[in-house]
Every structure is written in structure tokens, then in C-alpha cells.
Amino acid sequence: MSVELTWRNVCGRRLRRHGLTPPLAHGGPAAAAGAMCGAHAQVLSAAEVSIGLRLSGATRTDVLDALWSDHSLVKTFGPRGTVHLLPAADLARWCGALGGLTAGSRFAADVRVTAEQTEELVTAIGVILADAELTVDELTEALGDRVGSWAVDPVVPAFQTKWPRWRQMTEIAAHRGVLCFGPNRGRKVTYTNPARWLPGFTPAPHADAMDWLLGRYLHAYGPATPQQFARWLATTPGWARRLFENSELTEVSLEGARAWVADGDTEFGDPAQGVVLLPHFDAFAVGSQPRELLFPGRAWDRALARGQAGNYPVLLVDGVVAGVWHQKKTGRTVAITVEPFGELTARQHKQLDEQAQRIGTVIEARPTLAIGTITVGAHA
């Protein structure tokens, strides 16, 4: 007989393991990023808030110091090829796991590179970036000189223009462990080799790394199904099903549906309680499944963008999405407006004010809080 679990108990455990209720007591920004299996960093300021909310008294400066000063965080391409902040201590296993996944090219035949060209480009990128932080244009020029004109031909469709051919290699090069982000140079992105900051760095063996990643995912987001893990990684359900079948896992029942946790990890504790504000692309909202339970009722239409999570900052009440919110920073002040989907109790209003204060601390601004309708669209 499998363990019977309620959604609120599952949300309660996920919130605790993510460091959202309560915040993590130890480990700093790297521990916070590790707790959520990587912080989404398509918008770096949102990642700063995601990490800061999981640490008592942390600010965006602490996150940036971890990223660019002590390098305990690395900005790179994580699961699904999206930009993440990952703990440097875990990067070898992340690269070992992601670098071993196979995926077909989404590009036309005249744009794609061969297996041999892929190896040539990955090797060249690693060598060029070994002692440099280069913009896209600078890396393009260096690759043209080292590999040949075919590598930099403008053939990759992108935003009504064409990128050089090598640009389709950025995610692969990152997952092979030879490319990550360096500090921006003005408004321009730079790339570098993580070995500059992590001497002797090399990806871990794929099988061991994937076992580790599945364990980390189930710790943060379990119980889960193979289909949900496949969606999180952007890989095939069949591959994920075989991985689950060959791993030591425990089957449970989540609201009557089959799901799995790491072997024996069946203690769930108290159900989710309280109020939490999550920024754009927070990993809890993006990674938690089943999505229809996390975004019930009105939240499905109001807080998702065509079924995709992360496009709106969300209000969690007792572990589920119960509102959206928006912030506008002006100088040293940030105006936070929250649109709940239902009435909040006096206690929840107090908790919401505490959340607004925490966000103000993270972004180093004095917060004001208002309840009202959010009129801006996704990503605003």
C-alpha cells in the first residue's frame, strides 16, 4: 500500500525544502540556489529575489558577490537550456548530467552542424575562453580565426536577423563544461570558461551525475512522475520512464495519482500555511507539478501565460497560487502592488506585509504595499 499524500502536505514540504517557509539557516546564496535545483536567471534581478527570499536578511549584493566575487554561484545554461544560477560546487554534476542528454537539432539542415563540427566548436570555445571574458562579437571573431568562416556564417534565425552558426552551440558548450556567463560589459553579455574560477574543472560521469540530479529534483519537487521530470529537463518521457524504473524510488499516492519520491523519503510533516510572494520565474512556481493543483481556479487563467508558469510574479497562500503582484522601483523606493484572487484574513495581510518588507530588504529599497488590480502584462 503506497503512502497517501494530500496536496497541502506536499506543498508544505516543498516550501520548507526550498527555504521559503522558513528561510534557510545556513549556506548562503549557493545553498539557496541548490535547494531549488537552480535559480532561474533569464532576468537576473528576479534570480536575486528568488535567492534572497530563501535567506534571512540577504540582499541582492550578497547574491552578486557570490556570483562575481567568490564564484560560489555560476551563471550558465541549466535545464531546458534556460539561464540559471547554479552552485559552483555542483557544476561538475550538472554538466555531467545535462551534457549526456541527447536532443535533436531544431534547426534546418543547412544551418545544423555535424557531430564532427560540434566537437571542433566545443573544443575551440573551451580553449578560447580559458583565459578570457569575451562578448558574442569577440568570440565570433576568435572562432572565425581559429575554426574557419563556416563557424561564423550568419545562418541562425534570431529576432528578424541571423546569428553566426556557432551560436547554436552555446547551450551544448555550457553543458559540456567549457562555457558560462562572465560579468556583463555594459549591456553586452560576456562568456568565459568556468575552469577559470574552478581549477581542474571537468564534468562528472553522466550516469552518476544523472542519479544525483534525479535525487536533487525529487528532494525539491517530489513526489513526481517520469513525465514531469522529462518536462522539467525538456527530454523525452520514455527516457525518463526508464530512468525511474532503474532507480531506487518509492511510489506514493498524491491526491489519488501515482507519483514517486526518493527511496524512503516519505516524511512530509505539516501542510503548507502562510503567505509567500514569488518573483518572475521563481523555480518553485515553474518546477512544481501537477500545475493544475498549484494554479487552481482563477489562477490558471490569470497567473499563467498560455499554460506556462513564471511569466507573472505570484502570491502563494497555503502553498497554492492565489494572486499576482507587481513591483515598480523608483530610486530607493519600491512600490509593491498585490492582486489577491480572494479575501485575505487579517493574519494573511500581516504576513503579506512581512513579505513585502523582505523583498525590500533583498532589493535594497524601502517598500510600500498596496492591494489592487494588476494591469500590466506578463514579464512587466
Image (spheres, rainbow, N blue to C red):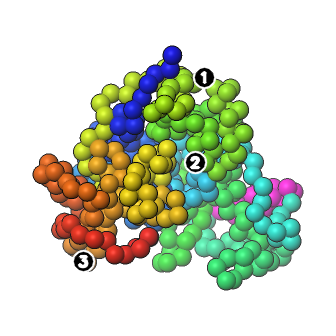
The residues bearing labels 1 and 3 have C-alpha atoms spaced at a distance of 52 Å
Q: Give the residue displayed 24% in from the left and 77% down from the top.
A: 331
- Could you tell me the amino acid type at mark 3? Gly
Q: Give the residue displayed 32% in from the left and 54% down from the top.
A: 322
Mark 1 or mark 3: name the one nearer the start of the chain: 1
Q: Position of residue 243 (x, y in %)?
A: 67, 32
**Secondary structure type for disc 1:** loop
Question: Can you tell which mark lies on residue 248?
Answer: 1
- Could you tell me the amino acid type at mark 1? Glu
Quadrant of image for the C terminus: bottom left
Q: Residues within 10 Å of mark 2 (few under 14, many from 20)?
A: some
- Was residue 126 drawn as part of the magenta stretch in this picture? yes
Picture quadrant of residue 377: bottom left
Question: Can you tell which mark lies on residue 232?
Answer: 2
Mark 3 or mark 2: name the one nearer the start of the chain: 2
The residues bearing labels 2 and 1 have C-alpha atoms spaced at a distance of 20 Å
Task: Tell me the residue that label 3 is attached to.
Answer: 331
Q: Give the residue displayed 67% in from the left and 27% down from the top.
A: 245
Quick check: can you spot residue 241?
yes
